[in-house]
Image (cartoon, coloured by chain):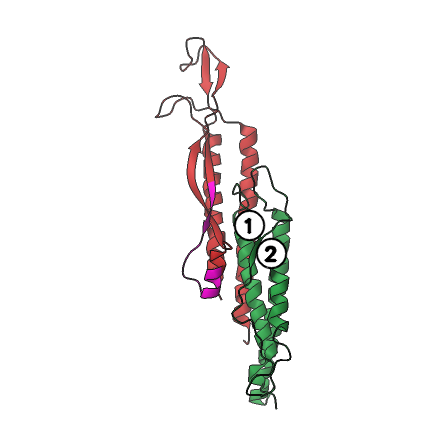
Chain colours: A red, B green
Amino acid sequence: MDFTGTLAISGSALSAERLRLDVIASNLANASTTRTPEGGPYRRRNVVFEAEPLEGEFGETLASLTEQGARQGVAVTDVVEDHAPPRMVFDPNHPDANADGYVAYPNVDAMSETIDLMAATRAYEANVQVVNATRQMAQAALGIGG
Amino acid sequence: MPNILFDPTIDGLARTLTLHQQRHAVLASNLANVETPGYRARELDFQDALKEAFESGEGRARPEGHGSIELASAERVPQVVEDKTAPRRADGNTVDLDVQMAKLNANGTSYLALARILGRRVALLRQAIDGTR
């Protein structure tokens, strides 16, 4: 019985989605940040998800399933900056306004961040369901002959 | 007298449980990668493997001839195939959340049912050994 491997798959998805939620949260928190340590306005960040095969520690049958690419967790391999141009707002009195009186605001779109937020939440919930199903199955297996 | 300790039903049920568990892992991978660009949904060739778990050895008596049925295909590994029926999203991912959740739940429920049946079967065996209720 190898339910721990399945739990590892779901666990990798839960932490990946949580990291994605963190990134979305910082995008929304910095939607109006005009100063950053690197200079210029905050830039929207995005996560890169990559399927990641789980290796080792399985029995032979399951290892062969792994070879077939059946057991794939997920990992956030990178957090990249969005290179879309900043939003220019005319506000000559702002301390960060340029010579023409425009202020560069972050390229964060609250609408699309909210949609990402919903997608991440749903994906997280789906994986919690998988964990619950795995737990139930493991309990049933332990109950055989009991 | 057939040897009840080598009950083909128990063997078949156990193998079927393993298949369900392997399919559960495949479906869990799909759901873990629901947001991974380019990921293709996978599926176990479940029906064929199930059929084989129960039927392939049927009617073939063991060499010792104690009457029980031997189940072949013990070493058989079910194949993992790409689920080609699923439509592809713009990011190249073919995992449909609803379809995968439905499959996961159906698979899990049937696992629970099989585990219960197997439990009953073992309980019967124990009752026969004890000779009591």
Tell me if residue B26 comes above or below residue B61 in the rendering.
above
- Residue B9: tell me if it is visible: yes
Q: Quadrant of residue A95?
A: top left
Q: Give the magenta range.
A: A49-64
> SS class of the residue under badge 1?
helix
Amino acid type shown at disc 1: Leu
Q: Nearer the viewer, residue B21 or A141?
A: B21
For the point 63% across and 77% down, the residue is: B58
Q: Nearer the viewer, residue A132 or A76?
A: A76
Q: Few, some or many C-alpha atoms within 10 Å of disc 1 (few <14, some 14-19, many ≥20)? A: many
Which tag, 2 or 1, sits closer to the chain's start?
1
The question of residue A54 being in magenta is answered with yes
For the point 60% across and 56% down, the residue is: B104
Q: Are marks 2 and 1 in contact (CB under 8 Å)?
A: yes
Where does the image place residue A102, in percent across and percent down from the top left? Answer: 46, 12
Where does the image place residue B22, in percent across and percent down from the top left? Answer: 54, 61
- Residue underneath mark 1: B31
Tell me if residue A36 comes above or below residue A132 in the rendering.
above
For the point 48% across and 65% down, the residue is: A61
The question of residue A53 being in magenta is answered with yes
Whole-number angstrom distance, CA of label 2 to CA of label 1: 9 Å
Where does the image place residue A111, in percent across and percent down from the top left? Answer: 57, 29
- Residue furthest toward the top? A100
Q: Nearer the viewer, residue A63 or A21?
A: A63
Which chain does the residue under circle 2 lie in? B
Instruction: Give the position of the C terminus of chain A as an image quadrant.
Output: bottom right
Q: Which mark is residue B104?
A: 2
> SS class of the residue under badge 2?
helix
Tell me if residue A59 comes above or below residue A112 in the rendering.
below
For the point 56% across and 88% down, the residue is: B130
Q: Are marks 2 and 1 on the same chain?
A: yes
